[in-house]
Image (spheres, rainbow, N blue to C red):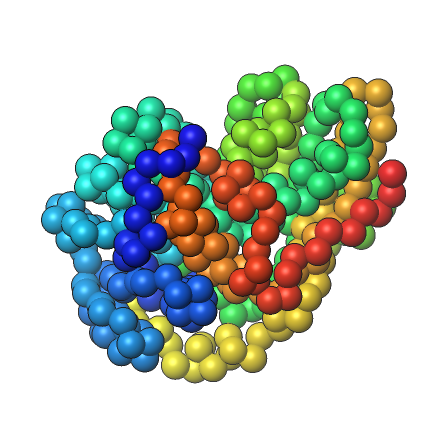
Amino acid sequence: MRGLNTQKKGKWLVYGTGSVAKQALGFAALAELPVSLAGRNAISVHRLATANGVPGQKLDLDEDIKAALQGYLGILNLAGPYQTTAPRLLEASLKAGIHYVDVSNDLSSHKLAWASHGRATTAGIGIVAGAGMGTCHSELLLNLLAQRANAELLEATLIMLPSGSSHKSSAVQASYAALLSEDGAEIKDHILRAVRGVERVHRLESWAGVGAGIVMATGDIVAISQTLPMKNISVMAAVDADPSRVRVLFDQLTCDARRKPLDQVGAPPNQQWEQQLTQAETQPQVRLLGEITTRSGQSVRGQLIAGSGTSAAAAGAVEVARAISENGLVGTHTAYQVLAGRMPLAKPSPRVVILDH
């Protein structure tokens, strides 16, 4: 549902000071989208706001921030871990009557976003969770595979491949650790269910190019179910190892993940880390694998090739905000529903390759 809360000149508040927020400010300038910056660390906010010539303010999510959101058209939540930031900023957006967009791939954030559809509709605002590579690119890949299948769909499998970069922010590391340490999730017979322990470890077929996949509880599951309702949907993180070996080490892996420290989240960026990040691999590579199976047993497989996940998230968030500014939005939607796969700001543009039909 569109058409309400349409203010082309409205300003958006970018919340976050990490690498995604940094690139989002650049994309916002290219898109002529007016923005201000906010975050939990005053030093980081001042540095990034000054460098980009935008207003900045420290915003503590432990306080009532409704007043600070007045006058904005919407908020771009680009600060993880989203298990913490999404509930607070989404609730504040609903109370302030402004749009909410994030790049989360966290299952709980997506469930909350869709549970808030009624409140958003009443408030006349739009909610979009997952404007980044997960889940927007995931939707793009599987929707194109479904179009190629052109038959009644039964199940979808998404495989997330490692980025190859070891330079990840503390918030990203915390989010990854949480995904690994918590139970996985899948849609089985149209019902969202938990997947626990070594049941999460699967042997992947040879076409995937990696040995094992670990079922993850990501927002992809929710987003895909909204655009492609199917009986079974699963999302796995690829592990280049024999599944039997992964099962033996699984308890140790999840225990190590639970001990990942969160105390550095929101701290000022490390200068050496920032320099390493700019030198990290950002060339186009295969980021996602997907498979769609129809009720007749037909299988269509493909891969999504894209550049940096950080850049994709920043571009996706700004693209969604610009679309809302131009067209308005009411209720909860997926990023794919808003953009229909169009991401002109992302360079290079994501590309889907069909492997077989």
Query: Which residue is more in the foreground, 298 or 233?
Result: 298
User: What is the x, y in percent for residue 311?
Assistant: 52, 64
Query: Which residue is more in the foreground, 76 or 213?
Result: 76
Establish if 115 lies above or below 342: above
Query: Which residue is more in the foreground, 132 or 40?
Result: 132
User: What is the x, y in percent for residue 151?
Assistant: 78, 25
User: What is the x, y in percent for residue 350?
Assistant: 65, 57
Residue 41 can be seen in this image: yes
Q: Tell me the quarter of the picture where residue 203 sits.
A: top right
User: Residue at left 26%, top 31%?
Assistant: 123
Q: Is residue 263 left or right of residue 299?
A: left
User: What is the x, y in percent for residue 67?
Assistant: 12, 49
Q: Is residue 283 left or right of residue 102?
A: right
Residue 250 can be seen in this image: no
User: Residue at left 27%, top 71%?
Assistant: 54
Image quarter in which the N terminus is found:
top left
Image quarter in which the C terminus is found:
top right
Please, which residue is most extreme toward the right here?
Answer: 357
User: Residue at left 26%, top 43%?
Assistant: 98
